[in-house]
Image (cartoon, rainbow, N blue to C red):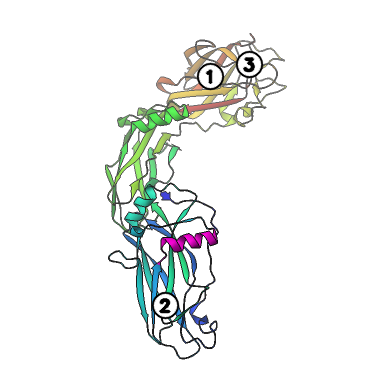
Amino acid sequence: MKKLYIASTIAGLLLAGTSCSETYDIYPEDSASVVMIKDAGAKELTVYSTETKVPVSVTILKGGHSEGRDAVIELRAMDQAEFDEYRAEAGTPYTLLPSDCFSFTQEGQTTSTQIQMSADETYKIVEVYINASAFGQYMENYDASLYRPVLPIVLQSSDASVNTDSYETFILPSYVEPGLEFKQNGLRSYDLSNGKMTATVTLPIENKWDITFTVGVDKDLLDKYNRENETDYTLIPEAAYSGLQTSYSMPAGTSSVEISLNIDPSKMDLNDALPLKITSCSVSGIEPDEQTGWFIADASVPLTADMFSTNALEPSEGSLANLLDNDLSTYFHTAWSVSVSGYHWIQVTTPDKYSKIQISYSNRVSATTNALAFFNFYTGTSNNDLTMVKKYVWDADGLNGASGGWTTLAPMSLSTPQNVFRIENTRSWNGNLFFVMTEFRMKAI
């Protein structure tokens, strides 16, 4: 929701007001009719771009201790000379609202109005209007950010006394262009285990209309996101999702609509993203949010310590559970104090099978790293049917040997779904058969 509000620290002229029940207690004994503005001072007003003329109520009180009489009262806007004098005395950071931005009648364009109050009337409510369209155009071009636009209103009367403590009120309007927007915009992650993805479009004000809006996929927004954030998300193939409508309805009285999509993870890549954009709205003055709801699959596998195994656990330090504690100061270490025949390996066995995987791991941050420099990667459905998928070499595959460094392997596509994944070290950066890791992560679909 775009709010064109000139922000400043304003000590408004907050004049003391009174309620209708108090009107006969504050006037001198010889006053026949005294008029004033109830709650005189500053009045905040939000003007939405969807409106035409926005009313603001001004209550005029009339009273006196002797027998009342009729009174003719005028409400009018301050002219420029009066306003300049007021601002010089009060020091408030206001600027005078142009006359085309307000009116004292619902029809036409006036800068004042006369009110007839009979002898038995003790108060009257008068509506003053802010012209939304003209005010919006004014605010679009307004650049004096240190001054707040204001409509100063003065009460005067030729046949009644005016309470000089409560004869001015100051309407302080702010202009808001409400926008349809995704409830959670930006890059979001979703668990696609149920084959569904949902997003919610909201309107942040009361919905008085039957709104129709359209939603589309915008690759340019994804490209922009990648440039600005140095990411490499790719556009999800159309074959991977279904159920996206070209238009949606938001009936009057409702303020949100859920968008639901069917997702086929088998047709996705690990870095696929869906950049949705609200492209149009049927109600004039309600603008679609130019930001998107970017959606990606939450491909992170929820690993637990019991999924890990090894043939060479070092008995003196470094448990497998340390790989999942989000603490780079703890680590898993294969055997260095005892002898183990063959290459050392670490293995993950997941409950579900996956066709696309990506593994990330981090190195030890203290002492020697003994990070992986040469290793073999195997997959299968049990310990007895493992097949080597790839041999990794530090330079060709960009393995990070730095202290505390992270390595993210390139995504791998498997010929059939697998659930056993093994890293077999053939030589660490220090030339040893044993190796060490601090954290382990896995994405898979």
Find the distance from the CA under tag 1 to the CA under tag 2.
Answer: 91 Å
Q: Quadrant of residue 55?
A: bottom left
Secondary element type, mark 1:
strand
**Highlighted magenta segment, given as a residue range:** 77-91
Instruction: Work out whether residue 434 or residue 94 is closer to the camera in this orientation and state it.
Output: 94
Three-letter amino acid code at disc 2? Ser
Give the class, few, some or many, for how many residues have Cα within 10 Å of label 3's Cα (few <14, many ≥20): many
Gap in angstroms between the C-alphas marked 2 and 3? 92 Å
- Badge 2 crowding class, 10 Å Cα cut-off, few under 14, some 14 to 19, many 20 or more, is some
Q: Nearer the viewer, mark 1 or mark 2?
A: 2
Identify residue for label 1.
Answer: 422
As displayed, is residue 442 above or below residue 13? Answer: above
Q: Is residue 270 left or right of residue 428?
A: left
Q: Is residue 184 visible?
A: yes
Give coordinates of residue 1: x percent, y percent.
41, 49
Q: Horizontally, is 355 left or right of 246 in the view?
A: right
- Is residue 269 located in the magenta-colored stretch of the structure? no
Q: Marks 1/3: CA distance?
A: 14 Å
Instruction: Inspect the image, locate mark 3, and give the three-letter code of the amino acid beneath it.
Output: Phe
Q: Earlier in the sequence, mark 2 or mark 3?
A: 2
Residue bearing the label numbered 3: 435
Local secondary structure at mark 2: strand
- Tell me the kind of residue under disc 1: Arg
Tell me: residue 277, above or below residue 27.
above
Disc ID at residue 148: none
CB within 8 Å, label 1 to label 2: no
Q: Residue at x 35, y 43 (%)?
A: 260
Mark 1 or mark 2: whose residue is earlier in sequence: 2
Q: How far across and how far down the image is residue 438, in percent?
A: 62, 24
